[in-house]
Image (tube, rainbow, N blue to C red):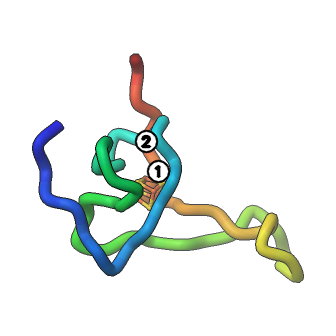
Amino acid sequence: MNQEKNECIQCSIHNCVHHAGTADYCTLDRIHVGTHELNPTKKECTDCDSFQYKMS
Ligand code: SF4
């Protein structure tokens, strides 16, 4: 993947197709953060809804 990293979005999820690969950044212009909880109270309650699994 040769996409430009977005220095505004740090990310360590290497399993995502949008990860910059060599650096811990996302390559998208923007992401959507959501939740799988009705009443989120901890960071574990939050999700990157822009995540897409990268087949290796
Ligand atoms: S889409 Fe979300 S999980 Fe994927 S690299 Fe970007 S910030 Fe990380």
The vertical placement of 10 against 52, above or below, is below
Three-letter amino acid code at disc 2? Answer: Cys
Q: How many marks?
A: 2
Q: Name the residue rendered at 83%, 79% in the picture.
A: 40
Q: Confirm or reject: label 1 Cβ below 8 Å from ligand 1.
A: yes
Label 1 vs 2, first from the N-terminus: 2
**Residue 16 image label:** 2
Q: Name the residue rendered at 35%, 48% in the picture.
A: 19
Residue 50's spot in the image, x, y percent? Answer: 43, 58
Tell me the distance, in whole angstroms, between the alpha carbons under discs 1 and 2.
6 Å
> Regarding mark 2 in the picture, which secondary structure is present there?
loop
The vertical placement of 52 against 40, above or below, is above
Badge 1: few (under 14), some or many (20 or more) residues near its Cα, within 10 Å?
some
Q: Name the residue rendered at 33%, 80% in the picture.
A: 8
- Dividing the image into four equal quarters, which quarter contains ligand 1? bottom left
**Residue 34 image label:** none
Q: Give the position of the N terminus as an image quadrant.
A: top left
Quarter location, residue 34: bottom right
Q: Give the position of the C terminus as an image quadrant.
A: top left
Quarter location, residue 41: bottom right
The vertical placement of 15 against 19, above or below, is above
Foreground residue among 12 and 36: 12
Q: Name the residue rendered at 75%, 62% in the picture.
A: 36
1 and 2 marks in contact (CB < 8 Å)? yes
Q: According to the image, label 1 marks what residue?
A: 51
**Does 36 sit left or right of 47 as displayed?**
right
The vertical placement of 43 against 2, above or below, is below
Three-letter amino acid code at disc 1? Answer: Phe
Q: Is residue 38 visible?
A: yes
**Does 33 sit left or right of 20 as displayed?**
right
Q: Confirm or reject: label 2 Cβ below 8 Å from ligand 1.
A: yes
Residue 21's spot in the image, x, y percent? Answer: 31, 42
